[in-house]
Amino acid sequence: MHTIEMSAQEQEQAIETARQVAAEFSKLGPQADKDNTFAYPSAAIMKDSGLVGLSVPKEFGGMGADIWTTCKVAAELSRGDPGIALAYNMHYIMVGILNGSFTDDQRKEWLPRIADGDILCGTFSEERGFGGLADTKAVPQPGGGWKLYGKKMWGTLSEVSDIWSGSATITDADGNLPTDFEARVAAESNFIVALDAPGTAPGLEIRKTWDAMGMKATGTHTLVFDGFYVPEDGYCGEMRGGVFASLEWASLLFASVYWGLAIRCYEETRAILRTKHTGPIFSADVGADLKARDIGYIQDGVGEIAYRNELTRRVIQATCRQLIEGDDDDWDPSMRPALIGMAKVFSTENAAHVTHKAMRLVGGASYRRGHVLEKLYRDAAAGPFQPLTEDQTYMYMGRLELGTGQDDDE
Ligand SMILES: Cc1cc2nc3c(=O)[nH]c(=O)nc-3n(C[C@H](O)[C@H](O)[C@H](O)COP(=O)(O)OP(=O)(O)OC[C@H]3O[C@@H](n4cnc5c(N)ncnc54)[C@H](O)[C@@H]3O)c2cc1C
């Protein structure tokens, strides 16, 4: 499942390209954050860089990046700007998940297009979150295919997407959802559709509702479907089975965006604290002219951030390596999502911790709007909401350890 196609040199080249793209993202990100808008020029930058086809296998014209290389690219992009990186991360997540559930014909149809630069969004979450079974209906059409009706609340990247993918529940011919729970789970399906132009197709409306604390450049708007047509060959299999079978592409890529955010936080904090002088002060540390870097707790704090970020890298890298080496074959299948999700939980918690810590070390200036740490702190706050959440991960693990649902003598 996780084969290595790239040479070490090709991997390094992809990461170097990501660094160059990240430099452009870092110029766009603060303004997009200020204006609460998607960073539109980022789409051409991504397409020109070739990184849209990063994880498409070589036989379909892509770069053939494995999961660890893709994670490192995601982290580099996030060092440039976490909001813009999280948007394109959704593309990488969907390429990984759909590649796992495509038929051979679908692989031949979609992967070369993506390798050529077609951007993909992935919309699952509705009003009832990611856990709620899709209330969006896929109503079978007499001539074949489905028409979609409903609303996706979290449409990251949708405005520049050439391809839509996401979930809907197949109904009967009259548009009635299955009433039986198991039948409803089985009817919840993934679909993929080429759009007429980025974010544009009959029966699809993007409502610009995104107004959040951080991650503003993701452009996570609401998608409204009113008769949006999905042809027969746009069916990509059962939704939960498909997503959970390839959950690593979500968990580890989310983890990598927040890892990149934490590295950026460290780099900015270190740069500030290396040169900061207090001038004459009278506070916990008294001095005629104190250098911030000579204060003990600042040394400890910077060390702690470096230490935690390095641990985060190790957790993501080790999890990728476990998958590449097939260690997961020996895992209890019901624990697989949580065992992979651990890396995401670790990384998102780390990002929240280090941004908070960095602000304390740098001082009150970092609390002002427009300060680089103020933005990173707000962006980091989005981490817990992407699946699997901390609570879900802990609960799955705790449930299995406690034997919840089993008889006492089992
Ligand atoms: C910046 C950003 C971008 C996003 N982009 C996208 C996107 O492109 N596509 C997309 O589909 N979604 C996207 N999402 C949505 C995200 O994945 C969640 O669906 C969304 O945050 C709502 O989920 P929730 O867990 O907060 O809400 P709910 O699902 O309502 O959860 C509420 C509470 O119940 C808990 N809970 C829910 N389900 C379970 C369960 N099965 N077991 C145990 N506990 C559970 C949750 O942990 C939480 O505490 C994005 C979110 C953010 C913040």
Image (cartoon, helix red, strand yellow):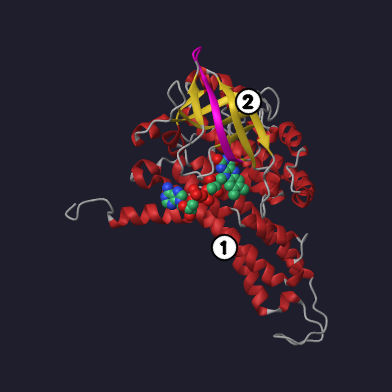
Q: Which residues make up the magenta segment?
A: 142-154
Along the polypeptide, which appears first: circle 2 or circle 1?
2
Secondary structure mainly formed by the magenta segment: strand
Q: Is residue 391 left or right of residue 332?
A: right
Residue 58 image point, x, y percent:
58, 26
Q: Of helix, strand and loop, which one carries label 1?
A: helix
Residue 99 image point, x, y percent:
51, 29
Residue 203: image tag: 2
Residue 308: image tag: 1
User: Could you tell me which residue is drawn at 39 percent across and 55 percent down?
Assistant: 395
Ligand 1 within 8 Å, label 1 CB: no
* Structural distance between the alpha carbons of marks 2 and 1: 47 Å
Residue 407: image tag: none
Q: Nearer the viewer, residue 116 or 410?
A: 410
Q: Which of 351 and 318 is in front in this view?
A: 351
Q: At label 2, which amino acid type do we have?
A: Gly
Q: Is residue 101 left or right of residue 180?
A: right
Q: Quick check: 135 above or below 254?
A: above
Q: Nearer the viewer, mark 2 or mark 1?
A: 2
Q: Residues within 10 Å of mark 2 (few under 14, many from 20)?
A: some
Q: Evaluate whether residue 70 shows in this view.
A: no
Q: In which quarter of the image is residue 202?
A: top right
